[in-house]
Image: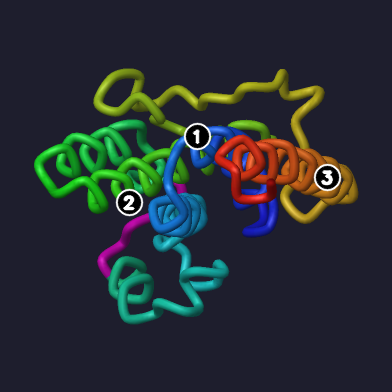
Amino acid sequence: MTAKGHIALALLPAIPIASFLNTQEQIVFLGAVGFGSLLPDIDEPNSFIGRRLGFVSIPLKILGVKHRTFTHYLIFPFFIFIFSLFLSRIWQIAGFGVALGILMHDIGDMMTKGGIKGFLYPFFKNRTFRILPKKFAFYTNSFTEYIIITFLFLIDSYMYYSFMFNSLYTLGVYR
């Protein structure tokens, strides 16, 4: 899935969750979700985040880290979430956002034909996980993916309007 698709997919659960937070927390949370939705592709120097953070992605490539390996395993967001529980509230919100973004990134990759091999590492190390049957899965950068991304952004826009503006109205900001 492309960076736009990962962000659009990650915003689906993030927007309703953010509506329960104050404005500062919303900014931190949504920013962290966006960052987390791109973070697993740090293992690929040609990815959106890999091109911007080459000082991380290039050494990973030199060390032989393959794409869709440990940064795509379920254990990666789990550890970030657990670690963030020991931090202050704003860092907990950021950590939860990053973990949610990573998890949604993985869900997006499991919708593609490639899936994620070893998602439940260390269990089922050689099994490729997909959410969709291979017949309905799509290729990254395909026309089908762009239709899905457009649909996701339309849903995200509607949800943002519905959740954020309605919560502001309820709080008395627009009265």
Residue at which label 1 appears = 17
**Mark 2 Cα within 10 Å, few/some/many (few <14, many 20+)?**
many
Residue 123's x, y, as percent?
Answer: 29, 19
The majority secondary structure of the magenta stretch comes to: loop
In three-dimensional space, the C-alpha distance between marks 2 and 1, rounded to whole angstroms, equals 13 Å
Residue type at the position of mark 1 = Ile
In three-dimensional space, the C-alpha distance between marks 2 and 3, rounded to whole angstroms, equals 25 Å
Secondary element at image label 1: helix
Residue at which label 3 appears = 154
**Mark 3 Cα within 10 Å, few/some/many (few <14, many 20+)?**
few
Q: Is residue 67 visible?
A: no
Q: Which residue is drawn at 59% across and 43% down?
A: 172
| Mark number displayed over residue 53 | none
In three-dimensional space, the C-alpha distance between marks 3 and 1, rounded to whole angstroms, equals 18 Å
Q: Is residue 15 left or right of residue 31?
A: right
Residue 175's x, y, as percent?
Answer: 69, 46
Q: Which of 164 and 125 is in front in this view?
A: 164
Residue 85's x, y, as percent?
Answer: 16, 37
| Mark number displayed over residue 94 | 2
Q: In this view, does 115 lie to the left or right of 20?
A: right
Residue type at the position of mark 2 = Ala
> Where 113 sits versus 132, above or below?
below
Q: Can residue 110 be seen in this view?
A: yes
Q: Which of marks 2 and 1 is nearer the N terminus?
A: 1
The residue sitting at the left extreme is 86
Residues rendered magenta in the picture: 63-68
